[in-house]
Amino acid sequence: MNTIALPLPALLPATNGKTASAERTLRRAEAISVSRDRSGQAIRALTGTLWITQEGDREDYIVEAPGVFIPTRTGRVVVESLTPAARFVFGAASI
């Protein structure tokens, strides 16, 4: 598994006062690690299947499009594609 820690610069306050979202596409077995340091964030699978794990949680989660995962803890969240390509959005829980 290739894990890449990426900053998500799009997660800045949007003009409407809500948190903007960042869209990412991963290839099979490609993963990213993001920091979840505020509440109200979610990961929505747009295409494909995601494997998600979060720091301090013994459970792993499989999310198929169009599913949503809402992290319950602060800290690192790792998202990996289990399909040839998976597209997801990380941002405000209302995504």
Image: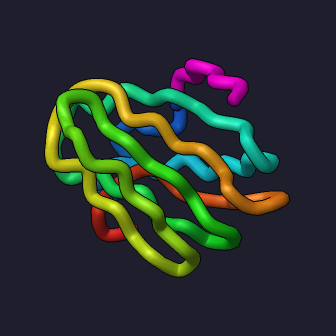
| Rendered residue at 34%/56% (across/down) | 42
Seen from the viewer's position, the closer of residues 19 and 45 is: 45
| Rendered residue at 47%/67% (across/down) | 63
Image side of residue 58 versus residue 94, left or right: left
- Colour scheme of the picture: rainbow
| Rendered residue at 78%/49% (across/down) | 28
Task: Give the farthest residue toward the bottom.
Answer: 66
Image quadrant in which you'd find residue 76: top left
Q: Is residue 12 magenta?
A: no
Residue 38: x %, y % from top left: 19, 36
Seen from the viewer's position, the closer of residues 92 and 87 is: 87
Seen from the viewer's position, the closer of residues 47 and 9 is: 47
Residue 46: x %, y % from top left: 61, 71
* Quadrant housing the C terminus: bottom left
Image side of residue 85 versus residue 72, left or right: right
| Residue 87 visible, this angle | yes
User: The magenta stretch spans which residues?
Assistant: 1-7
Residue 45: x %, y % from top left: 55, 67
Q: Is residue 4 magenta?
A: yes
| Residue 15 visible, this angle | no
* Quadrant housing the N terminus: top right
| Rendered residue at 38%/35% (across/down) | 77
